[in-house]
Image: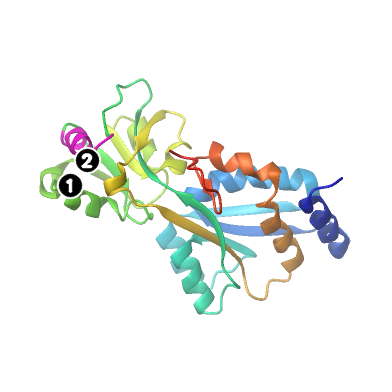
Amino acid sequence: MTDGFSSASSAVNKSLMSTTSVFIRIVTSNATNALLSALAARFEARTGLRVAIEHDSAKTLLARIEAGERADVAVLNAPHVERLVGLGILEAARPFARSLIGVAVRKGEPHPDVSTVDALRAALLGARAIAHTVHGASGMYVPELLRRLGIADAMKARIVTRPGGLIAKVVEAGEADIAIQQISELLAVPGVEVVAPLPDAVQKTLESAAAIFTGTPRRAAAEGWLRFFQSPEAAGLFQEKGLEAAGCSNGAVR
């Protein structure tokens, strides 16, 4: 007996006739890059199709695509995908994953209590500096988070930012005590430890979606790639990389 993906991958390979010259280009935001890289390795092993992944901050990547950049598949924040679908750049959006924002500290450092809103507020006020991105989906939420906590003014002089990328590298380098970013991105930096997600009262769940670029000449391969996301082989990788697969009811990152 074969699973649904085995049949699909066979069909993809037959329709392409030769896999040696075919590759699928994927563009994605930083939050899903580690997961997609892991999925790509499994997909390549099963199909022989090569997958090239390019990643950038959510805001920057959206601007690049709107300016004319094209690939075969995009995996981005769901609102961005819907926007590009509306512009005719992408085909129909398909739910991909859900992600929570979390807190991380340098590996080996004490873990502050961030289990409640009051505890999180105290932890941030007690930090020498905190770090977040400017253009990433979670980074753009941090100023709002600080306002909701009532400490925006108090934290102004103790915020370290980067345009995008893995902000936990700033904590790893000792430039800040706490990094705030999507948990999937925090897990990608070996020199830090994830403390916990933000408390529910101030949490922001970020949903991502996948879609095929309109007019791609590698549509059959792109369809096989998206189908692979639903396979049992792929399921465990979502949780391992700090994400919850779309349609999964148990919180993979809690």
> Which mark is nearer the camera, 2 or 1?
2
Q: Earlier in the sequence, mark 2 or mark 1?
A: 2
Image quarter in which the C terminus is found: top left
Magenta range: 115-125
Q: Residue, x 31% and y 45% (percent of image)?
A: 200
Tell me how far mark 2 sits from mark 1, CA to CA.
8 Å
Q: Which residue is mark 2?
A: 117
Q: Residue, x 33% and y 33% (percent of image)?
A: 171
Q: Indicate the colouring scheme.
A: rainbow
Q: Callout 1: helix, strand or loop?
A: helix
Q: Quadrant of residue 103?
A: top left
Q: Callout 2: helix, strand or loop?
A: helix
Q: Which residue is mark 1?
A: 149
Magenta segment: does it hold 55? no
Image quarter in which the N terminus is found: top right
Q: Residue, x 40% and y 29% (percent of image)?
A: 193
| Image: 171 above or below 13 | above
Please provide percent x and percent y for residue 183. Answer: 42, 41
Determine crowd level at label 2: few under 14, some 14-19, many 20+ residues with C-alpha closer than 10 A. Answer: some
* For residue 30, side relative to residue 72 (left or right): left
Residue 20 shows in this picture: no
Q: Residue, x 44% and y 68% (percent of image)?
A: 63
* For residue 195, side relative to residue 31 (left or right): left
Do labels 2 and 1 touch, CB within 8 Å?
Answer: yes
Q: Could you tell me what secondary structure mostly forms the magenta stretch?
A: helix
Amino acid type at image mark 1: Leu
| Image: 3 above or below 176 | below
Magenta segment: does it hold 123? yes
Please provide percent x and percent y for residue 137. Answer: 38, 55
Which mark, by number, is residue 203? none
Please provide percent x and percent y for residue 234. Answer: 66, 44
Amino acid type at image mark 2: Val
